[in-house]
Amino acid sequence: MVGGGQLARMSSQAAIGLGLSLRVLSDRPEDSAALVAARTTTGPVDDLAALRAFAAECDVVTFDHELVPPAHLVALEAEGHVLRPGPRTQRFAQDKAHQRAVLGALGIPVPLNRLVGSVDELAMFGDELGWPVVLKAVTGGYDGRGVWVFDDPRNAAHLFASGREFLVETFLPLDRELAVLVARRPDGESVVYPVVESVQVDGMCREVIYPAPISSEVAEHARGLALNVAAAVDAVGVIACELFLVGEHVLLNEIAVRPHNSGHFTIEGCVTSQFENHIRAVLDWPLGVTTPTAPAAVMVNVVGGSTGADPVANLSAALAVPGAHIHLYGKEARPGRKLGHVTALGDDVTETRARARRAAEILTGEQLPL
Ligand SMILES: Nc1ncnc2c1ncn2[C@@H]1O[C@H](COP(=O)(O)OP(=O)(O)OP(=O)(O)O)[C@@H](O)[C@H]1O
Ligand SMILES: [Mg+2]
């Protein structure tokens, strides 16, 4: 797995269960997965020589992020390395304009959008379609970094000065944000996970709630949409579809072609976790069933608080919360950084959510911002 973050760390856990030796190429020795994976190579993921040397030791190369330069992916594949997902699939997650254009043209509902390169073009879009608008960096954004809401185009002048490319889209009155994961084998065989609600704060996922409080019709529609998207991008491994619910309409926000924060609950909350199914899928092995293990599952992220306090200091106190499954990523505590997560299972979503939140609040020593 290229990338040494918490997704690689949790993938390593799944690989251990299967008796596999998952190698990790990580940027820095202190990365979350590098701390635990026995076979870790340290090297920059934008260095083709480092990628090539790493790939030479692997049967299949997969990814914990979307940061490998597209040209390097193409080069590695041309040299015969097996990349799953491959460059064409990864491009959808690397380039928001490509994603919107191709999936929109295939009939997947997406917000109205346009590429813009100046304050004037931004103004034209907003005047035509209404303010506020959402401006997004075409490449390189994550956790809301790379997403801005503007009601006055002049406020975006500093962004255009940077020379980056931007996509502007209509600001939708979201009723909820949903997510659906699909695991897909190279031949197209797929399994789809239950629909969850993802609660975002400042553009970052903070909580994931199963079941999503939506009708069974909307849920089935969302699952069907996610399967269509997975096929359209020729996904291999796990693909996460972040969805917007506006009234009864489901729109695609964005995809990630790897395990995803909205699927951490599957470690305890589904028969087969997203991490195990990602590994099975990229190895072209039979996929595991995705049936929920409890009527309700709630995941709460442990995000570094303003004091920079390390949640490890509060671990034993948090473990006293009954049924709180605590995952800490071994990352240095910094404000706003995802340091871990808590999952609770139960019969009732309100009670389950309260328990997961309690454990997360004990860990950070701060109240959740919602
Ligand atoms: N068109 C829109 N209308 C309303 N809200 C939006 C729109 N686009 C994005 N948002 C809000 O901003 C959040 C972040 O947007 P997006 O998922 O595109 O960015 P990201 O930084 O790539 O996300 P991630 O945190 O998943 O890496 C969304 O989850 C949503 O809350
Ligand atoms: Mg997102």
Image: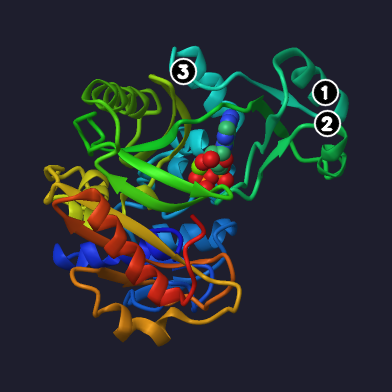
161 displayed left or right of 360: right
Residue 139 spot, x, y in % from top left: 63, 41
Task: Give the residue drawn at x 57%, y 65%.
Answer: 336
Residue 123: assigned label? 1
The local crowd at label 3, few if under 14, some if 14 to 19, many if 20 or more residues have their Cα within 10 Å, is some
Of residues 360 and 52, which is closer to you in this image?
360
Residue 94 appears in the figure: no
How far separated are the C-alphas under marks 2 and 1? Answer: 5 Å
- Circle 2: element type: helix
Residue under pointer 2: 153
- Circle 1: element type: helix
How far separated are the C-alphas under marks 3 and 2? Answer: 26 Å
Question: Of the residues under marks 1 and 3, which one precedes in the sequence?
Answer: 3
Check disc 1 and give the amino acid type.
Ala
Q: Is residue 208 above or below residue 23?
A: above
Question: Of the residues under marks 2 and 1, which one precedes in the sequence?
Answer: 1
Residue under pointer 3: 109
Check disc 2 and give the amino acid type.
Pro
- Circle 3: element type: loop
Residue 148 spot, x, y in % from top left: 69, 41
Determine whether label 1 and label 3 are within 8 Å by CB.
no
Task: Give the residue drawn at x 77%, y 32%.
Answer: 151
Task: Give the residue drawn at x 11%, y 43%.
Answer: 289
Check disc 3 and give the amino acid type.
Pro
Question: Of the residues under marks 3 and 2, which one precedes in the sequence?
Answer: 3
Location of the N terminus (image quadrant):
bottom left
